[in-house]
Amino acid sequence: MSPPPFRVAKLNCLAFPKGTVPKCELTGAPAQVALVTGSQTFYFATQDHALDAWHGILRKIAPLLGPLRTEAAAVGTEDERAKRAYTMEVSKKALVDVCLQEAAKFLVQRSFDLAVPGALVALKFLEDVYGKGGPAVVETIAPYALLAEANLGMGRFEKAKHFL
């Protein structure tokens, strides 16, 4: 039997530089656990958040996130930097589509807790590509609607109202 594609480990706060605390990928709260995959490490406030994120979206996109989460070297010609920026933007837009499809699939299956991570990742990528506010806010309607619907399904009415 092969080992699982991920493991959840408790964080050792001493392993990080003084004053540096990793943030939860879903809530932004201080992380307590790490979800370690073959290609990336993700940080979460609780083990439940880590498992929901893994089963909700990360199992599909974790290997693709490496280049998107690392800073590119500032070397190369202007054309090379422009090509990299364009490639990053196209990759983020493609991942947004995957995330939204997964979130919608889980809503149809009434697995509301698994729909949230996909919608949140889509929202983060859309904000990276288009920025927050302004005319580009139209692009963020779909993930906000999915987040509202998921929270309604879980009975979190105040949170659902926030996303609407």
Image (cartoon, grey):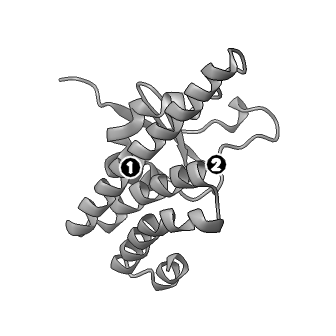
150 up-or-down from 88: above or below: below
Q: Is residue 11 left or right of residue 155?
A: right
Where does residue 85 sit, x and y in percent of width and height? 59, 32
Could you give the CA–CA distance between mark 2 and mark 1, rounded to whole angstroms?
Answer: 16 Å
The residue at the point 30 percent across, 54 percent down is: 102
Q: Secondary structure at mark 1?
A: helix
Q: Is residue 29 above or below residue 94?
A: below
User: Could you say which is closer to the camera, residue 89 or residue 63?
Assistant: 89
Identify the secondary structure beneath mark 2: loop
Q: Mark 2 belongs to which amino acid?
A: Lys
Residue 45 drawn at (x, y percent)? 56, 53
Q: Amino acid at mark 1?
A: Leu
Vertical placement of residue 151 versus 129, above or below: below
Can you name the residue that lies furthest to the front here?
79
Residue 55's x, y, as percent? 32, 48
- The part of the image, by quadrant, that contains residue 59 is top left
Q: Which of the 4 quarters of the picture holds residue 133?
A: bottom right
Which residue, given by chain and number where applicable, does mark 2 sit on? 23
Residue topped by disc 1: 51
- The residue sitting at 29% across, 63% down in the picture is 104
